[in-house]
């Protein structure tokens, strides 16, 4: 998995436990076009503030990421720490500090262990290599049980191009989880304005469809860097080339988003809540997200219980307009509710088999209009509680 | 606990498991003034629809309640079932069916077991007695671990009066829980318009302060009946008498609401989230409810972990306006965050003792204005998942 123009490295800096990868560096050969979307949480971590400021130029050359410490709610000291670590990284790389973007994930409210990070930086820079992306994917994990990578190859103006992304999702089961970090690299040539536009569109259909707001933590960041090494004519505006790059981005980000859900803390069942027949796009989204985040629906799925009454109750409080006596609910192809009423135990038994058989779609037809929306989500198990009750201990 | 003018009875009708109280009747000697507040969920259970229709008169004489079956999402058949059971109860009581209000709680989407309820009604009517309220409190339980009753005595126009209420909350940990039922009885004399006004006010400060919307399930109902046997001059409008009755109602409903939270499914810690210094009343409410319902805050409390970063993150996504660097957070009297930053491990250790010592207040000062609001809530434990994953099995 090589993306021309980029190199990667990871290290065990001791920010988390000893013997765990927790620091990574991703660097381009030269300054490249870059774009990002960030958390919309009012409480923003220091690295988010600094990255946002530095990316106003639309260009970047490196990303320095630590796991184990979010560097959030750390005030001026936190900002200074982000400046100091990225400053040293820039020095070692021989580039201006303004081209190095910081990102952090982990516990909120603790000081960044400056000495440990600085001690690890020289080797990190020395170890940069083209095939290092999987190492970086591992070093950004927190409660993830496995690294998340996605890869795409396509053509732009007759030239092959590559798109690769890594993500960490510390349990996106709920929108207030600590941190989602996503880093995407391509050798395509495009302006940062084009990258930003494509990133926003793809984000709306991927990471913003696995939570209420993919943007509600203090550290959430999705970064996209484009080295231009593919040699395609620079994409500077709308057209078939921009669409082709967008399609690749959509695929990579959708893939990563699904991996985050599948690795949801304690998750045993992954499912898509799809709402059809809504009166407005807003109604469709409200209905889908309310069902997808309902603790009662999620615990029922953990128990493989076709408890559609909880789905009806969640729809009823979602704010979407519909007539309860029109609603249809199906698990995969197995319809369990028609005209707002249950079809009986046989239908539920068949639907239970759908839940047991793996990933499935919970289909809801409000029969109130023509709009559709969806959320990918997972069930809610005892392990979720265990992981989060003992997160800091 | 006797309320002049009312009698109560309970039975084991076999709607739930054998040997469990699941049917109750509450009856006045004659038609009395009555008022209610209901769920605002778009999906309303048959008994809610019928009670609302019958209470347009402002008068009622009896309430028939079953547990184990919500009679929700049951269509015309469900309405017919509610009519039939309350009709038979009326017949046995010798009163018009329109004076008998139905209420149900339990699983959504299953047909009410008509034959079992009808078979149990004659004995239920025969067993009505003035001291039967505790039996009724037991017979309306579902996943409650203990019955919930509250009692108040005061004076109105020089006459002693009594106010008593019972509640069931099948885990109000989350707003989409099955059902909250509350029944309150008084011998005070007041018009149904006065009762309705007082009920709404007291509800806003009690049951609507233990969830996002105390009103989001399919069956939620709070009913208030006033027999007038206290002999006070009829309260027909604003004045000290209405205020005195309102104070009693406030106390009884607040007491019941706290009992519901304390019996929250799987709850080990009960706490009040109090937000001060908000820029608007709406901001205060948004901030309080977002923290009170945050799964990450609730799981941290289960782990007795002073993880204030999660509180900051929840505040940040609540929609309330504030400057993160102004926020103060305290557990009881132990301040852990000042100026948006943590005060360190010593402060956290003291705050942990507060969590461990029993009910506590989580105090948040946004320092953005003069408005205050609060929510009572409980933690989120493995037992919550267990109870809800296996609810129907």
Image: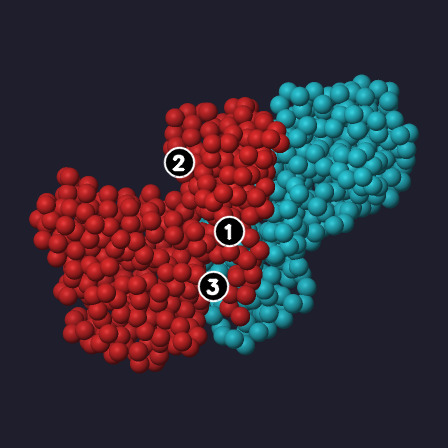
Chain colours: A cyan, B red
Nearer to us: label 1 or label 2: 1
Percent coordinates x, y for residue B385 in the rendering = 56, 58
Within 10 Å of the Cα at label 2, are there few (<14), some (14-19), or many (20+) other Cα atoms?
Answer: many
Q: Position of residue B355 (x, y in %)?
A: 52, 41
Q: Of A110 and A32, which appears nearest the observer?
A: A110
Disc marking residue B373: 2
- Cα separation, mark 3 vs mark 1, equals 27 Å
Residue at 72% across, 47% down: A144
Q: Which corner quadrant holds the N terminus of chain B?
A: bottom left
What's the distance in space between the residues labelled 3 and 2, CA to CA?
32 Å
In this rendering, does residue A41 appear at all? no
Q: Chain of mark 3?
A: A
Are labels 1 and 2 on one chain? yes
With A243 as the anchor, is B247 left or right in this view? left
Pointer 1 indicates a residue of which chain? B
> Which residue lies at the image location 59% right of the left edge and 64% below the top edge?
A303
User: Are the residues at dot 3 and dot 2 in contact (C-beta closer than 8 Å)?
Assistant: no
* Residue B268: assigned label: 1
Task: Give the residue at mark 3.
Answer: A309
Q: Residues at marks 3 and 2, common chain?
A: no
Q: Badge 1 local density, few (<14 within 10 Å), some, or many (20+)?
A: some
Instruction: Count residues near mark 3 (Cα–Cα under 10 Å), then give few for <14, some for 14-19, many for 20+.
Output: many
Q: CA distance from mark 1 to mark 2?
A: 24 Å
Q: Quadrant of residue B61?
A: bottom left
Q: Is residue B258 left or right of residue B297?
A: left
Disc 2 is placed on an element classified as: strand
Looking at the rendered structure, the secondary structure element under dot 1 is: loop
Observer able to see residue B370: yes
Give the vertical position of A188 relative to A328 (above or below): above
């Amino acid at each position: 998995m090589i993306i021309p123009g980029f190199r990667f490295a990871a290290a065990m800096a001791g920010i988390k436990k000893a013997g765990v990868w927790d620091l990574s560096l991703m660097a381009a050969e030269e300054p490249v076009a870059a774009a990002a979307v960030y958390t919309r949480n009012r409480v923003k971590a220091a690295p988010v503030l600094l990255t946002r400021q530095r990316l106003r130029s639309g260009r970047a050359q490196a990303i320095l990421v630590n796991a184990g410490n979010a560097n959030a709610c750390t005030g001026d000291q936190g900002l200074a720490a982000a400046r100091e670590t990225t400053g040293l990284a820039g020095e070692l790389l021989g580039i201006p500090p303004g081209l190095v973007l910081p990102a952090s994930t982990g516990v909120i409210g603790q000081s960044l262990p400056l000495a440990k990070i600085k001690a690890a930086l020289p080797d990190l820079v020395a170890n940069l290599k083209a095939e290092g992306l999987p190492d970086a994917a591992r070093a950004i994990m927190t409660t993830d049980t496995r690294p998340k990578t996605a890869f795409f190859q396509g053509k732009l103006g007759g030239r092959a191009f590559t798109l690769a992304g890594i993500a960490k999702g510390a349990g996106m089961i709920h929108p207030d989880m600590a941190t989602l970090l996503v880093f995407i690299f391509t050798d395509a040539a495009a302006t940062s304005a084009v990258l930003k536009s494509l990133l926003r569109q793809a984000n709306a259909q991927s990471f913003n469809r696995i939570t209420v707001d993919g943007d509600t933590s203090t550290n959430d960041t999705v970064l996209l860097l484009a080295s231009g090494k593919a040699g395609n004519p620079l994409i500077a505006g709308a057209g078939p080339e921009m669409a082709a790059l967008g399609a690749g981005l959509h695929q990579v980000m959708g893939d990563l988003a699904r991996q985050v859900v599948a690795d949801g803390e304690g998750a045993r069942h992954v499912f898509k809540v799809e709402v059809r027949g809504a009166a407005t796009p807003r109604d469709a989204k409200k209905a889908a997200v309310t069902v997808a985040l309902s603790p009662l629906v999620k615990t029922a799925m953990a128990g493989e219980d076709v408890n559609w009454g909880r789905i009806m109750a969640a729809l009823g409080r979602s704010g979407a307009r519909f007539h309860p006596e029109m609603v249809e609910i199906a698990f995969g192809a197995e319809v369990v509710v028609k005209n707002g009423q249950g079809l009986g135990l046989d239908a539920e038994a068949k639907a239970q088999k759908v839940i047991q058989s793996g990933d499935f779609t919970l289909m809801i037809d409000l029969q109130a209009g023509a709009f559709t929306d969806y959320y990918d989500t997972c069930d809610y198990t005892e392990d979720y509680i265990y992981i989060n009750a003992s997160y800091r201990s």
